[in-house]
Image (cartoon, grey):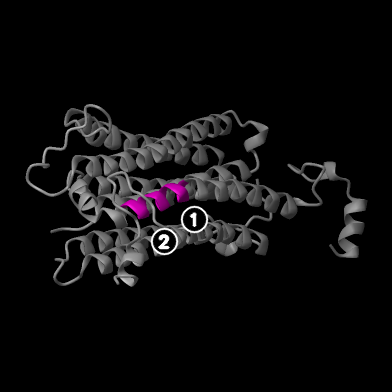
Amino acid sequence: MSGHAHVTPVKVYFTVYVLLLMLLVATVGVYFIPHNILNPPAALAVAMAIAIVKAALVVGFFMQVVYGSKLTWLWAAIGFVWLSLLAGIMIDYSTRHMNMPDGSAFDRMQSQSSVE
Amino acid sequence: MSVEAAHSLHNEPHEHEEHLAHQFMNREQQDESYIVGMWSFLVTEILFFGALFLCYSIFRIQYPMAFQEGHEELSWVYGCANTVILLTSSLTMVLSVHAAQTGKRILSAMWLAATSVLAAGFLVVKLAFEWYPKFQHHLIPGVNFHWPHEQFTEVAAGKAELFFGLYFAMTGLHGIHVVIGIGIMAVLGTMLLLNHKSTQYYMPIELAGLYWHFVDIVWIFLFPLFYLIGKR
């Protein structure tokens, strides 16, 4: 079973695991900060930033991308590039008049800019 | 590929290198093909879940109050417990890959078994402690959906139903991935114990690991988006 594979020291895995647990404690901690100190959009941004760091740790070390070839790097990144294109559709939604199930419209940006 | 490499390849027929299929020049190329192939599948998975996350974003922007009130029906304690379980299962998964890389076949199978047990534990928390009480409280979208707080707040039941629709669709799809993961680990673990020739090289375990870590990453995002929307 020996081979040319990169064998990551077990210590690295345990370190990453401890970091992941610490970030989990951090994200739960942010949840308990009252809204008058950290407003909801900021709390969401912090929670998502923590989640992105956790995901990066998993992709980098558990999924071995850090030690991977350039092609592996590219492939790992490309999924998130496509995802950002998909998220770009959000911009399109905000420029259209889209009826929601309750009859309201998803056109916040328009209604704010064209009040006249 | 360098000329020397081409020559050495010519001089050494492929049969001499263990666990190398003949369409590949060498082990590195074979490994890279396997890993990139798995990542290609994961890219489709990222987009598969991504569409649901996009749907979630649109409705959360539109109905922030419904998401706020809906999430109060979920317990962050169970969500947090399940996050710990999945993060630990990712650790046991890499330990299984490490054992396979260093030739410890039985140990690798044991770590796979540990990963499966943790995955099953995740499903127990999800189904027995979370989904089942939701059924009892009529929080499953459909004709029997009943939103108990409607008379007290401005949130219409339909919007809360939408929140629970997304909750069950996204955690449900994730749960299906967990079940599939348990199946993959059971098959690979059995093959390792039988010393099947396909698992004598570590790559199948590595690829199962890539899949399992992806499942973990999806949960890393689901947890704050459903359980930690915000205290009032």
| Neighbourhood count class around disc 2 (C-alpha, 10 Å): few under 14, some 14–19, many 20 upward | some
Question: Tag 1's secondary structure?
Answer: helix
Label 1 marks which chain's residue?
A
Which region of the structure is painted magenta?
Answer: B49-59
Residue B112 visible (yes or no): yes
Q: Main secondary structure of the magenta part?
A: helix
- Closer-to-camera residue (B220/B68): B68
- Closer-to-camera residue (B160/B13): B160
The amino acid sitting under disc 2 is Val
Q: Are marks 2 and 1 in contact (CB under 8 Å)?
A: yes
Q: Earlier in the sequence, mark 2 or mark 1?
A: 2
Provide residue B8's location: percent of width, then percent of height.
Answer: 89, 57
Residue A57 visible (yes or no): no
Q: Which mark is residue A62?
A: 1
Provide residue B34's location: percent of width, then percent of height.
Answer: 67, 47
The answer to whether A108 is drawn above or below residue B76 in the figure is below
Q: Quadrant of the N terminus of chain B?
A: bottom right
Residue most extreme to the front = A116
Q: Quadrant of the C terminus of chain B?
A: bottom left
Residue A109 drawn in magenta:
no
The answer to whether A38 is drawn above or below residue B24 in the figure is below
Label 2 marks which chain's residue?
A
| Neighbourhood count class around disc 1 (C-alpha, 10 Å): few under 14, some 14–19, many 20 upward | many
Q: Residue at x 67, y 60 (%)?
A: A71
Residue that badge 2 annotates: A16
Provide residue B15's location: percent of width, then percent of height.
Answer: 84, 41
Q: Residue at x 33, y 35 (%)?
A: B123
Q: CA separation, marks 2 and 1? A: 8 Å
